[in-house]
Image (tube, helix red, strand yellow):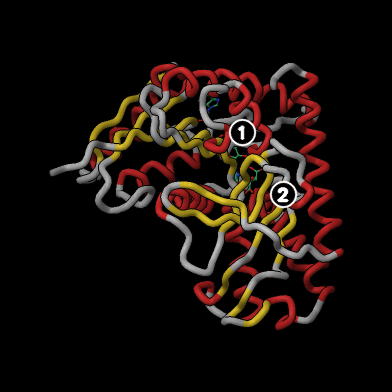
Amino acid sequence: MPRTPVTVTVTGAAGQIGYALLFRIASGQLLGPDVPVRLRLLEITPALAAAEGTAMELDDCAFPLLAGIDITDDANVAFDGANVALLVGARPRTKGMERGDLLEANGGIFKPQGRAINDHAADDVRVLVVGNPANTNALIAQAAAPDVPAERFTAMTRLDHNRALSQLAKKTGAPVSEIRRLTIWGNHSATQYPDIFHAEVAGKNAAEAIGDESWLADEFIPTVAKRGAAIIEARGASSAASAANAAVDHVYTWVNGTPEGDWTSMAVPSDGSYGVPEGLISSFPVTCADGSYRIVPDLAVNDFSRVRIDASVRELSEEREAVRALGLI
Ligand code: NAD
Ligand code: LMR
């Protein structure tokens, strides 16, 4: 018997990540090859025509798993019955805009969307925020949705995780499939900390195998943390296909689980672990099973890691204070 379609809402559907993401969802890569999906696309009114164009192309792919597409500029309609909500649309930083202005502009998007999720989404809704500043936008949406369990609001650091995997594979010559237990800590920003002290490459501790702290401090960490900016510089636009790929990975792993003996990185509400103030949506090592995630407990954190985790978490605390002062949470 065919399964009931899962409703997946995508905001910013006419944007460049949306264009790379929707076809992957409709083909079954987000949830699995036997799970039909119904897409709900949310856009601002001037971009509805472009979203219609993308929907025409989705139709033209004749995806067997695609059970329908609705397009709207009304968040209450877009999140009605949503099982998975991918919040991609956001206000980009423009010339002369301070960080506070950016947080305020995004508050105007993520607060009403959080409220619409609260009022209309399915009981099992899972939310991934991609739009930047992703961690704090997730916090704003979560605060506007008091009836949804707080842990259902997550933000994306899987792109940073995948970038770190690739850089480590290049350095060691090992394939990505041989690397496990890498972690991104903190904010999806240049302060993030990609940590290889618990990572394994072909069964050996990665930091010990490399044995070169200056490579870590001067090459690996800045390359991963500033990769988004490097792509903007090279492409003249921010990462899109790799961001969409990471969003697919994030949700697929959350729903279907992490492989035995491995973990992934997700920005999730802190339970106070690792000195991260409770409630901040910060990236941690997490395992997933049965549709839930769990922060990996009791990892030893050395001095090298401690200062870097603290710096990124400090930035998140400052962002939380800023949106609190603006009355957004
Ligand atoms: P884009 O500008 O191409 O598309 C954004 C879309 O969002 C536009 O079509 C716009 O009309 C729409 N939008 C704006 N306000 C909206 C609202 N209130 N409701 C619905 N839609 C709305 O941008 P993009 O390249 O697709 O990137 C989207 C966001 O993802 C940006 O904030 C970008 O910085 C962020 N991003 C995050 C990561 C990550 O790793 N977390 C990686 C790459 C990009
Ligand atoms: C990325 O990591 O590629 C993006 O978050 C960069 C950006 O500012 O959109």
Q: Extreme left residue here?
A: 1
**Position of 275 compared to 292: left or right?**
right
What amino acid is labelled 2 in the image?
Ser
The 10 Å Cα crowd at callout 2, few under 14, some 14 to 19, many 20 or more, is few
In the image, is residue 124 above or below residue 46? below
Residue 128 visible at all:
yes
Question: Badge 1, how many Cα within 10 Å: few under 14, some, many 20+?
Answer: many
Q: Is residue 224 left or right of residue 121?
A: right
Which amino acid is tagged 1?
A: Ala
State which quarter of the image contains the C terminus.
Answer: top right
Q: Quadrant of residue 327?
A: top right
Q: Which residue is identified by label 1?
A: 138
Image x and y of residue 211, in percent: 78, 81
Residue positioned 71% across, 45% down in the render: 187
- Ligand 1 falls in quadrant: top right
Taking the image as shown, residue 287 lies to the left or right of residue 230, namely left
Identify the residue position indicated by label 2 in the image: 273
The secondary element bearing badge 2 is classed as: helix
Q: Is residue 50 visible?
A: no
Percent coordinates x, y for residue 9 in the rendering: 41, 32
Residue in the image at 72% along x and 55% along y:
225
The Cα–Cα distance between marks 2 and 1, rounded to whole angstroms, is: 19 Å
